[in-house]
Amino acid sequence: MLRFVTWYNTEHRHSGIKFVTPEQRHYGQEHAILERRRTVYEAAKQAMPQRWKGRDTRDWSPMGEVWLNPPKVSAADDHKLSRAA
């Protein structure tokens, strides 16, 4: 189990947090990593724009707060939130 947890936190790049590891996110490395990716994608788009056919490149902006198991919102709570906005 320890080997799996170590791999999961230090090597596995999670799609829900823009393909960085939980460790990279925890230690604040996420911003630099995502900025480098954005730069690489923009350079690739400049070099070969036909590949993107007018589309934007992938959004590499850092994620906000994420939840493993988000709290469930009841229909009543959802209605209150939509009225507040």
Image (cartoon, rainbow, N blue to C red):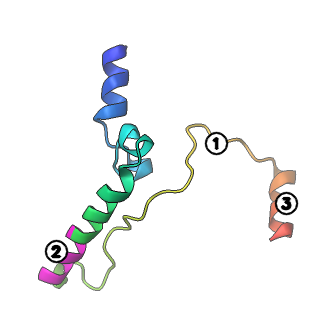
Q: Secondary structure at mark 2?
A: helix
Amino acid at the residue labelled 2: Ala
* Percent coordinates x, y for residue 82 in the rendering: 80, 66
* Percent coordinates x, y for residue 84 in the rendering: 85, 68
Disc nearer the start of the sequence (2/3): 2
Residue 70 is tagged as: 1
* Percent coordinates x, y for residue 5 in the rendering: 38, 23
Residue at 86% over, 68% down: 83
Residue at 33% over, 78% down: 56
Judged by its main secondary structure, the magenta piece is helix
Query: According to the image, label 2 marks what residue?
Result: 44
Q: Is residue 83 above or below residue 55?
A: above
* Percent coordinates x, y for residue 49 in the rendering: 18, 84
- Asked whether, in this view, residue 46 is left or right of residue 57, the answer is left
Residue 15 is tagged as: none
As measured in the structure, the alpha-carbon distance from the residue carrying label 3 to the one carrying label 1 is 18 Å
Q: Quadrant of the C terminus?
A: bottom right
Amino acid at the residue labelled 1: Pro
